[in-house]
Image (cartoon, rainbow, N blue to C red):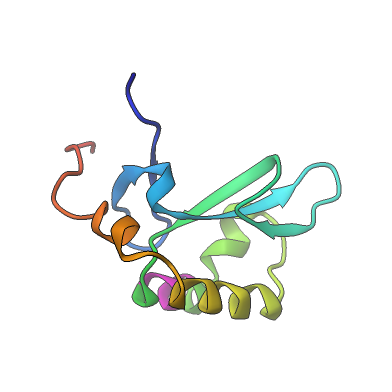
Amino acid sequence: MLPNYRRCISCRKVAPKEAFLRVVRLYPSHEIALNQGMGRSAYLCPETGCLQIARKKDRLSRVLKAPVPESLYQALTQQLESYPLVKRQQLGNDRPAIE
């Protein structure tokens, strides 16, 4: 069975969705959550640079079509610090060439 691939909203890398951090606008409440729930989703590489770009260019708000609170960016930063190195390595050279 083929894995589900997703694309980082900052750097546009493609990888299995398990390799990314998932930010969700929950349905129907429109609250923003990390890695859980059903609704509109955005995916970020577990790298500080991707988070900084997404924050600077307000990409999460645009993709999710909802305002993203500052507390979510702080939670993402904390989660990045504890993110397993194994999942970061999944974003290496084994990505398929999807354009």
Give me the residue at 52% from left, 64% from top.
59
Viewer-closest of 22 and 85: 85
Q: Residue furthest left?
A: 93
Q: Is residue 38 above or below residue 71?
A: above
Where residue 19 appears, x then y in whole percent?
38, 51
Q: Residue 95 at x, y = what percent?
A: 20, 43
Asked whether 10 or 3 is in front, the reply is 3
Q: Residue at x 66, y 49 (%)?
A: 36
Q: Residue furthest top?
A: 1
Q: Is residue 75 left or right of residue 12?
A: right
Relative height, residue 67 to residue 19 (above, below):
below
Taking the magenta stretch, the answer to whether it contains residue 53 is: yes
Q: Where is residue 28 shown, x and y percent of the image? A: 84, 42
Query: Residues in magenta?
Result: 50-54
Q: Measured from the top left, where is residue 63 in percent x and y?
A: 57, 54
Quadrant position of the N terminus in the picture: top left
Q: Dividing the picture into quarters, in which one does residue 60 lie?
A: bottom right
**Residue located at (62% from left, 63% from top):** 61
Does 70 appear in magenta? no
Q: Residue furthest right?
A: 29
Total tally of numbered discs in the picture: 0
Q: Nearer the viewer, residue 87 or 54?
A: 87
* Magenta segment, prevailing SS (helix, strand or loop): helix
Look at the image and tell me in which quarter the C terminus lies. top left
Name which residue lies at 65% across and 44% down.
40
